[in-house]
Image (cartoon, rainbow, N blue to C red):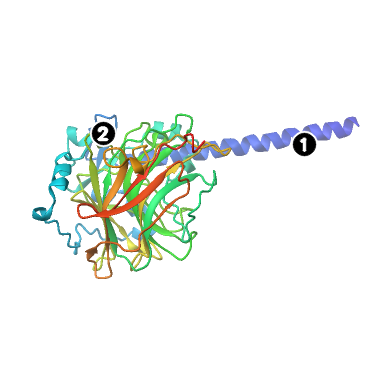
Amino acid sequence: MDFLFSNMHIFFWKQLYCFMLLLMMSMASQKLEVKRILSESRRNPVKSIKSPDGDIIDCIHIAHQPAFDHLLLKNHTIQMAPNYHPEILLDKSKMSNFELQRKHHTRPIAQLWQLNGKCPKGTIPIRRTKKDDFLRARSILRLPTGRLPRFRFRWRPRTAPVKNSATYEYAYAFVQSKEYLGTKATINLWQPQIDDEDQGGSSLSGVGVVGGPSTRELNSIEAGWIVNPERFGDNRTRLYTYWTSDGYQSTGCYNLFCSGFVQTSNEIALGASLSPTSVYNGSQYNISILIWKDPDQTVWWLQYQNKTIGYWPTSLFKYLVHNASAIIWGGVVSNGKGDGLNTTTQMGSGHFPEEGYQRASYFRNLQILNGSNTVVPPDMITTVSNQPNCYGILLGNNTDWGDYFYYGGPGKNPKCP
C-alpha cells in the first residue's frame, strides 16, 4: 500500500512538473511574440506624432509597412493610385432644401492625431501598438480577432428571433442577387456605450464586400467605425478595416495589425479615433465609405470620405478575385457575457430605428457597383436581425437619401431581458 501511494505521489509530481514546464514555455513564447509585434509595430518611424487622445502615430516608410510580411506580397509592386475610379455623381442643384439643411449640420470628421502634425509623403501613419494593448487582452492569440465583432454573414439568414444563440448580435441589410464590384454608403457616426461588465464587449458599424460558397470559405472585406475598449483602451469611436479569406477562422485581421492590406495614404490612420460624433436630438455627423474593384490592377480599393486609403490585393482571396457575390451594410455587437445573458452594449446610437432622425443611427445612400463598375442603387435589399428586441433595423427609400435604413438599439432592456 505504501509502495502504491509512493508511486502515485511520484506520478502526481511528475505530471505537475510537466504541466508547469509547458505553462512556462507557453508564457515565454507569448512574451517573445509580444516583443516581436511591439518591435515590428514601431518599424523605425521617420516621425512620431502624439495624439490628444493618447495614441502615438508612427510615420513609417511606405515600403516597410506590415502588408509586405505576407508571403503572397513579398515581391508586390505598390499601386500608388487607382487606374479606375467609379463615377459617382452628386448634383447639388437637384438636392432638396431638406437635404441641404441636414448637410448644414455636418462638418468635417477629423482624426484627432491630425491636430498635432502630419506624416511626410512617402510614409504611412500607423497607430503604435503598446504593451498595455496586450495586457488588456487575455491572450496574444485573441488580439487580431479576439471578441471584436465582425460580420457573420449567413447565406440563409435567420428571420426569427434566436434567444441568446450567438456571441455576435447583428442588424444589417444585404443584397446577393448579382455579381458586384463594390459598394458605397454614408454611415451615421456615433459613440455607443459598451457594457462595463462585458470585458470583451464592442460595437461596430460598417460595410462588407463578400464572396464564397459557404460560411467556412467566406471571403470578406469590411470597413467602417468601431468602439472597442479592450483592444484600444478607451470608448472612442475609431476607423476600422477587416479582411478574411476563410470565414474568420485563421486568416485576416483588423487594420494593419497583420499583413495583407496595403496602405498608400499618408493622411489617414487605421484605428485612429474619429471626432466629432453625433448627438441625440442634436447635430449629426457622417462618414462615407467606398470599396471598389479596380479592373486593371486586380485590387480592391478603399476610400474614406474623399481620401483613398489603400487596397487589398486579390491574391489574398479565392472568391474575391473577380467580383463579390454579396454586399452587407449594418451593425454588429459582440456579447462576451456568456451564460445566456444579454449585454447592454449599444449598437449605433443605442436607440431603436423607430425613433428616426437625430435619435436612431442610419446608413443612407446605399449604392452598389454593378458588373460595369458603375454606381447604381441596389435592388432586392433584405434586412435581418438575430435579436430584434435588442437591436432592430428599418428599411426605407426617399428622394433625399435613396435607399437607407435606421438600425441599432440598447441591447438588454425589458423586452430583451
The crowd level at tag 2 (other Cα within 10 Å; few <14, some 14-19, many 20+) is few
Residue 156 position, x and y percent, is 48, 60
**Label 2 to label 1, Cα distance in Å?**
68 Å
291 relative to 106 in the view: left or right: right
Residue 301 visible in the shown view: no
Residue 38 visible in the shown view: yes
Q: Give residue 1's quadrant in the image.
A: top right
Q: In the depicted view, which residue is nearer to us: 177 or 96?
A: 96
Q: In the depicted view, which residue is nearer to us: 146 or 343?
A: 343
Mark 2 or 1, closer to the camera: 2
Residue at 62% across / 36% down in the picture? 21
| Residue receiving disc 2 | 281
Residue 346 versus residue 100 in the image, above or below: above
Residue at 83% across / 31% down in the picture? 6
> Residue flagged by tag 1: what amino acid is it?
Phe
> Residue flagged by tag 2: what amino acid is it?
Asn
243 relative to 20 in the view: left or right: left
Q: Give residue 8's quadrant in the image.
A: top right
| Residue receiving disc 1 | 11
Residue 198 position, x and y percent, is 48, 33
**Residue that lies at the very extreme toward the bottom in this rendered image:** 372
